[in-house]
């Protein structure tokens, strides 16, 4: 849900080099089931669950991590590195 600028600042802050998706129109959040509605005093608000989703170069989803563990992108980064090593070995 964050803007591309916010994602770029976050990536720089935690020193990651892979792209972060900005989904301001909520299409991906809805299709992956990570946009959740919450009722607050009779009003409905939507928040995105924090998630790391690793999609390989062929468009295959390799990993979806949600919740507290998704705050740290190291698991997603490890998955990306493993995929890269497997591709390089081919």
Image (spheres, rainbow, N blue to C red):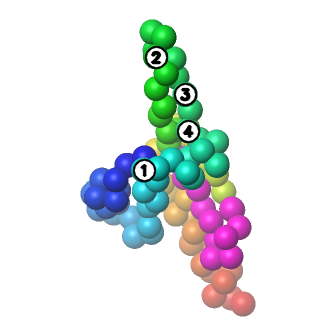
Quadrant in which the C terminus is drawn = bottom right
Sequence-wise first label, 3 or 1:
1
What kind of element bears circle 2?
strand
Residue on which the image places disc 1: 24
In the picture, the disc for residue 46 is none
Q: Secondary structure at mark 4?
A: strand
Query: Which residue is the site of mark 4?
Result: 35
Q: Please identify, in this view, whether the residue under mark 2 or under mark 3 is nearer the observer.
A: 2
In the image, residue 35 lies at what x, y percent? 55, 38
Mark 1 or 4, nearer chain start: 1
* Residue at the spot of label 3: 37
Residue that extends furthest to the bottom in the rendered view of this protein: 90
Q: Secondary structure at mark 1?
A: loop
Q: Residues within 10 Å of mark 1 (few under 14, many from 20)?
A: few
Q: Is residue 14 visible?
A: no
The residue identified by callout 2 is 43
Residue 78: x and y in percent read 56, 64
* Range shown magenta: 51-62
Any part of residue 55 in sight? yes
Task: Determine whether, in the image, residue 52 is placed left or right of residue 86.
Answer: left
Residue 40 to residue 20: above or below = above
Q: CA distance from mark 3 to mark 4?
A: 7 Å
Residue 15: % across, % down: 33, 63
Mark 2 or 3 closer to N-term? 3
Callout 3–callout 4 Cβ contact below 8 Å: yes
Q: Is residue 38 above or below residue 63?
A: above
């Amino acid at each position: 849900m964050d803007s591309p600028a916010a994602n770029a600042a976050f990536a720089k802050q935690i020193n990651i080099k892979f792209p972060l998706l900005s989904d301001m129109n909520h299409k991906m959040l809805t299709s992956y089931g990570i946009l959740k509605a919450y009722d607050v005093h009779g009003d409905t608000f939507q928040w995105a669950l924090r998630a790391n989703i690793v999609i390989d170069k062929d468009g295959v989803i390799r990993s979806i991590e949600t919740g507290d563990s998704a705050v740290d992108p190291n698991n997603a980064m490890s998955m990306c590195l493993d995929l890269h090593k497997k591709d390089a070995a081919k």
